[in-house]
Image (spheres, grey):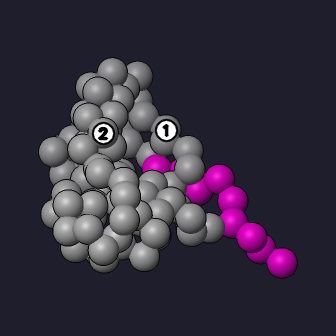
Amino acid sequence: MELGGSDAFIVLDDADLEKTIPWAVWGRMYNGGQTCCAAKRFIVMDSIADEFLEKFSSALSGLKPGDPMDETTTHGPLSTEAALVQLL
């Protein structure tokens, strides 16, 4: 039985980080980060690793965990997809 793995999110040095970062957040946090196909390993070229990490960390810190019934919550159990779509 397959229960998920260490799914990689690979970022090459020619990536447009303005487009990549929202998808990286979605890939990690979709379904509360509790899906077997969520991105678990981020492999980023050395030449853009610092910039990627800074932007990725900033985007993640912008998520507001909490009660999914609270309209200000952007990340929570059973939260709507609208919260993550805003990042895209």
Q: Is residue 67 left or right of residue 33?
A: left
Point 57% across, 68% down: residue: 35
Q: Magenta stretch: dominant SS? A: loop
Q: The disc labelled 2 sits on which kind of residue? A: Ser
Of label 2 and label 1, which has the lower sequence position? Answer: 1
Q: Which of the numbered marks, if any, corresponds to residue 68? A: none
Point 38% across, 42% down: residue: 11
Q: Is residue 53 left or right of residue 8?
A: left
Front residue of 34 and 71:
71
Q: Residues within 10 Å of mark 2 (few under 14, many from 20)?
A: few
Point 44% across, 46% down: residue: 10
Alpha carbon separation for disc pair 2 and 1? 20 Å
Residue 53 appears in which quarter of the rendering? Answer: top left
Residue occupied by mark 1: 43
Q: Which of the numbered marks, if any, corresponds to residue 61? A: 2
Q: Residues within 10 Å of mark 1 (few under 14, many from 20)?
A: few
Q: Is residue 82 left or right of residue 23?
A: left
Disc nearest the viewer among 2 and 1: 2
The stretch of residues the image draws in magenta is 1-9
Point 36% across, 65% down: residue: 67
Q: The disc labelled 1 sits on which kind of residue? A: Ile
Q: Position of residue 50 (x, y in %)?
A: 33, 21
